[in-house]
Amino acid sequence: MKSYPKALLISLALLAPVAAMAESGEAKPEAGAYSQGNGGSRAERRERFMAERMAELRQDLKLTAEQEANWNTWTAKMKEIKETKKQSRPDREAMKNLSAPDRLEKMIALQKAKTAYLEEALAATKTFYATLTPEQRKVFDEKTPFGKHGKKWKRHGGPRHQGAK
């Protein structure tokens, strides 16, 4: 019976800081803290991340003055493709109201549009890629998602990302 009061005292001692934190309100994040205090909305963070990745790629490529114009053309074209693609996203509510065959037709049309965007990206990338030196091409292949899936694609771990089949 003597262990019961001792266990109770230990439990209370361990829970006291948690209770104090809950009472002070420190454990509760402010309303909207996710979007305000942690770097903005998801879209803003994604845009910032992509801008950082592009700046890193540009720095790693060590472009010459002659290649800068091609870099600017390529990045502008990629942004244009991204914006056009973003505007062509289907309205989910409208898709729900379509019949199954109409929904499939819409999905096929969207896939054709996606293929067209990829073909535009391919043309722009080929033009820029042709201006790079062999060393720069290696860096470009390693650092871009449509290259050889370099180090950044192995972040998640797991057998799929470590070369196991």
Image (cartoon, rainbow, N blue to C red):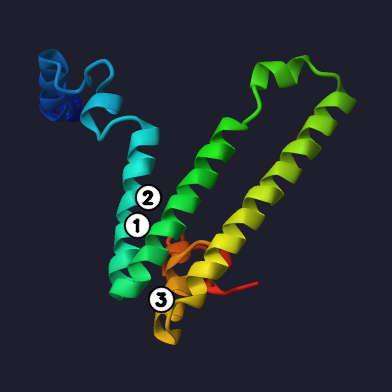
Q: Which mark is residue 53?
A: 1
Between residues 30 and 142, which one lies in front from this camera angle?
A: 142
Q: Which residue is mark 2?
A: 50
In this rendering, does residue 8 appear at all? yes
Image height check: is 55 above or below 114? Answer: below
Image height check: is 148 above or below 82? Answer: below
Are the residues at dot 2 and dot 1 in contact (C-beta closer than 8 Å)?
Answer: yes
Q: Position of residue 127 (x, y in %)?
A: 53, 68
Residue 164 placement, left or right of 156 = right
Q: Which residue is mark 3?
A: 139
**Going from the N terminus, do you reach mark 3 or mark 1 first?**
1
Q: Position of residue 3 (x, y in %)?
A: 18, 30
Q: Position of residue 67 (x, y in %)?
A: 37, 72
Between residues 162 and 81, which one lies in front from this camera angle?
A: 81
Are the residues at dot 3 and dot 1 in contact (C-beta closer than 8 Å)?
Answer: no
Specify the amino acid type for callout 1.
Arg
Location of residue 29 (image quadrant)? top left
